[in-house]
Image (spheres, rainbow, N blue to C red):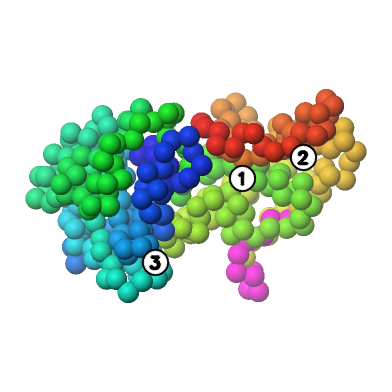
Amino acid sequence: MPLNALLGLVTRGDVNRPVMAEAGFRLVGLEIPVISPSGRVVIDAVLFHEDTNHLVQCESKAGANVEDRQACAYAAVTAKDVVQAAYVDLKTRAEPTLETLYVCLAEHVGRIKQGVRATGLAFPVLAIGQSRIELHDNENASQLLRDAFASGVELSAPPARIIPFDHDTLADVIKGYVLPTLVGMMASRVGHVSLTSLTEQTAKHYPLYGHGAQQKLRSKVEVAVRDIVMDQPENFAYEGRTGRRQEGLVRFLRTPEDFDLRGRTQAYQAIGRQGRPSGRRRPQVDPNQLDLLEELDAADTGEEDSLDAPDDREGGRT
């Protein structure tokens, strides 16, 4: 939740006000590894203010503990380090600047602030609540952050689930997101898709992840794909890397698009049923993603125009 709430602040189009986007910040990196004089640290999110070349490296905390070694590593990172590690494109000649921001749940903000102070460092802390987001210890923050959070942020709804899974999520959970992506590609009559392209389509923020996180994401998607192929060998095939091809490939053996409307709908429904884990709760799919099974089922009952109508679920929440 802390990371998704942070991303909501730099993502326009949500019901909650994106105060950091309005202030000129944008997301330029996720899970970015940096080697500092105090050791290696993986930055959860990197935000960039292009007009001033100011960077914010963010540490997202779901719990209430601050690691001394990690905090010291963050303090030793330089703006140049982050620019190079996240491949930030500087468009002005201003010297880049950097600050560290801890992001946590509001219920843990007291302990996080205490933990930061115990290290002898001075970082601002962004507290994420169910109805409000507020910047603490703002005397340690840049003027850009202080201005953005001058009045805090009142939430009209809980923070959106912008990233439903990451490289640490179990492959069995990721499978619940990979299958709808494959179904969407079947409807487009594509013959195959590379593992990287499939990962990019399933995890929309894939290009912003560091190299190591990207590798883990691809590996998790590959495990999910192999499981799907075992479930549905009549629909999908997976070909691993070869000497001539550097990554795996998913082939579509047949598509329900070849059937008439009723047969097509039933075929898509069958694919969806086969993809559900037996005896386990099915992972929720991002409601922002087009649900072809639902749409085609509506078409079968006489609402054929629903496929061409605008998706009024835009901005839907979990």
- Locate residue 306 relative to residue 129 in the image: left or right: right
Q: Is residue 308 above or below residue 205?
A: above
Disc 1 versus disc 3: distance between alpha carbons? 30 Å
Find out whether residue 249 is within the magenta segment.
yes
Which marked residue is nearer to the observer: mark 1 or mark 3? 3
Classed neighbour count for the residue bearing mark 3: other residues with Cα under 10 Å, few (<14), some (14–19), many (≥20): some
Identify the secondary structure beneath mark 3.
loop
Identify the secondary structure beneath mark 1.
helix
Check disc 3 and report the residue beneath it. 88
Residue 13 appears in the rendering: yes
Disc 2 versus disc 1: distance between alpha carbons? 24 Å
Where does residue 84 sit, x and y in percent of width and height?
Answer: 35, 70
Q: Quadrant of residue 248?
A: bottom right
Most frequent secondary structure within the magenta stretch = loop
Q: Are marks 2 and 1 in contact (CB under 8 Å)?
A: no
Q: Amino acid at mark 2?
A: Asp
For the residue pair 40 and 295, the one nearer the viewer reads as: 295
Which marked residue is nearer to the observer: mark 3 or mark 2? 2
Find out whether residue 311 is within the magenta segment.
no
Q: Is residue 223 above or below residue 261?
A: below
